[in-house]
Amino acid sequence: MNTSTQSESKFPAGTLVFGLILIVIALASLSQTVFNWQFDTPLFFISLVALAGVAMIFSGIASARKAKLKNNDNFSSNNK
């Protein structure tokens, strides 16, 4: 039972990762224009999506671990 008056907010990991993807794309486009250099665009986007997927997996694992610890704490405090 959660008896706290303040509700916990969920961390929007998906929103954070999506925002980071947009920032990286914008910085890459800007750097191409400013420094006049080229890179392999398909490989860049494949790498970017792969890294975003890894970030989402780690955030999911961290969230599940945090929920498990919270449930264990609630279970032990209710059994006292």
Image (cartoon, rainbow, N blue to C red):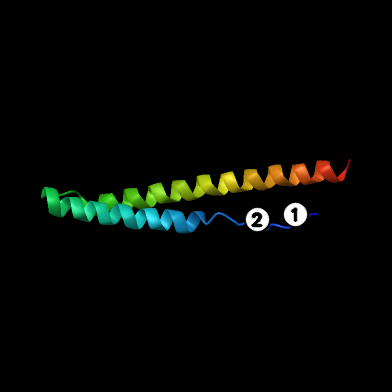
For numbered disc 2, what is the local secondary structure?
loop
Q: Circle 1: is it few (<14), some (14-19), or many (20+) Cα within 10 Å?
A: few
Amino acid at circle 1: Ser
Give me the disc on residue 47: none
In percent of width and height, residue 76 lies at 82, 41
Q: Tell me if residue 13 can be seen.
A: yes
| Count of residue discs | 2
- What residue lies at 85% left-to-right and 46% top-to-bottom? 78
Residues under numbered marks 1 and 2 in contact, where contact means CB atoms less than 8 Å apart: yes
- 78 vs 57, left or right, is right
- What residue lies at 59% left-to-right and 56% top-to-bottom? 10
In-front residue for pair 76/48: 76
- 1 vs 70, left or right, is right
Q: Circle 2: is it few (<14), some (14-19), or many (20+) Cα within 10 Å?
A: few
In-front residue for pair 65/34: 34
For numbered disc 1, what is the local secondary structure?
loop
Q: Which residue position is annotated with label 1?
A: 4
In percent of width and height, residue 61 lies at 57, 45
Give me the disc on residue 8: 2
Quadrant location, the C terminus? top right
Amino acid at circle 2: Glu
In-front residue for pair 7/78: 7
Q: Tell me if residue 37 can be seen.
A: no
Quadrant location, the N terminus? bottom right
- 73 vs 26, left or right, is right
- What residue lies at 26% left-to-right and 50% top-to-bottom? 43
In percent of width and height, residue 34 lies at 13, 51
